[in-house]
């Protein structure tokens, strides 16, 4: 289930307050600065640091390649 566009525009990382990458195909939000994944469960983003997971360098590279290929949307895109 895709997140509402307005929600994607306002979501920020609860840890560093920066933007995230939304991967609709994987139901995740990703913070590449902290290498942390926040899952989306039943259409609801789980924005708790304790519930997030750290990714290794290989997973980070895979996600960044997908983002570079246009498969992610950056949150907070309308901010600033």
Image (spheres, rainbow, N blue to C red):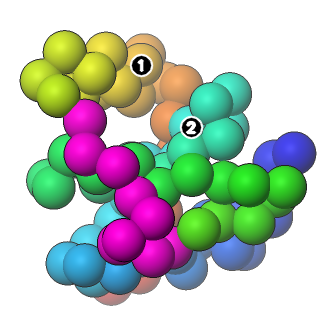
The secondary element bearing badge 2 is classed as: strand
Q: In screen coordinates, is 76 left or right of 60?
A: right
Boundaries of the magenta span:
47-55
Q: Quadrant of residue 55?
A: top left
Q: Quadrant of residue 41?
A: bottom right
Q: CA distance from mark 1 to mark 2?
A: 9 Å
Q: Is residue 57 above or below residue 45?
A: above
| Location of residue 40 in the rendering, given as x and y in whole percent from the top left corner | 66, 54
Q: Check residue 23 in the rendering and tell me which mark sits there, or answer none.
A: 2
Q: Quadrant of residue 26?
A: top right
| Location of residue 35 in the rendering, given as x and y in whole percent from the top left corner | 20, 46
> In which quadrant is the C terminus drawn?
bottom left
Which residue is found at the position 14% from the left and 53% from the top?
A: 33
Q: Earlier in the sequence, mark 1 or mark 2?
A: 2
Work out whether residue 78 can be spotted: no
| Location of residue 34 in the rendering, given as x and y in whole percent from the top left corner | 15, 55
> In which quadrant is the N terminus drawn?
top right
* Residue 50, magenta (yes or no): yes
Which residue is found at the position 45% from the left and 76% from the top?
A: 48
Q: In screen coordinates, is 44 left or right of 50?
A: right
Residue nearest the observer in this picture, 11 or 59: 59
Label 1 CA crowd tier, 10 Å (few <14, some 14–19, many 20+): few
Q: Is residue 39 above or below residue 26?
A: below
How many numbered circles does the render carry?
A: 2
Label 2 CA crowd tier, 10 Å (few <14, some 14–19, many 20+): many
Residue highlighted by disc 1: 66
| Location of residue 73 in the rendering, given as x and y in whole percent from the top left corner | 52, 45
Image marks 1 and 2: residues in contact by CB distance under 8 Å:
yes
């Amino acid at each position: 289930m895709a997140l509402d566009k307005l929600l994607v525009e306002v979501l920020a990382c609860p840890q560093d307050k920066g933007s995230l990458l939304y991967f609709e195909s994987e139901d995740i939000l990703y913070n590449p600065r902290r290498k942390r994944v926040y899952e989306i469960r039943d259409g609801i983003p789980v924005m708790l640091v304790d519930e997030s997971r750290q990714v290794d360098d290989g997973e980070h590279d895979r996600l960044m390649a997908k983002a570079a290929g246009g498969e992610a949307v950056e949150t907070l895109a309308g901010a600033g």
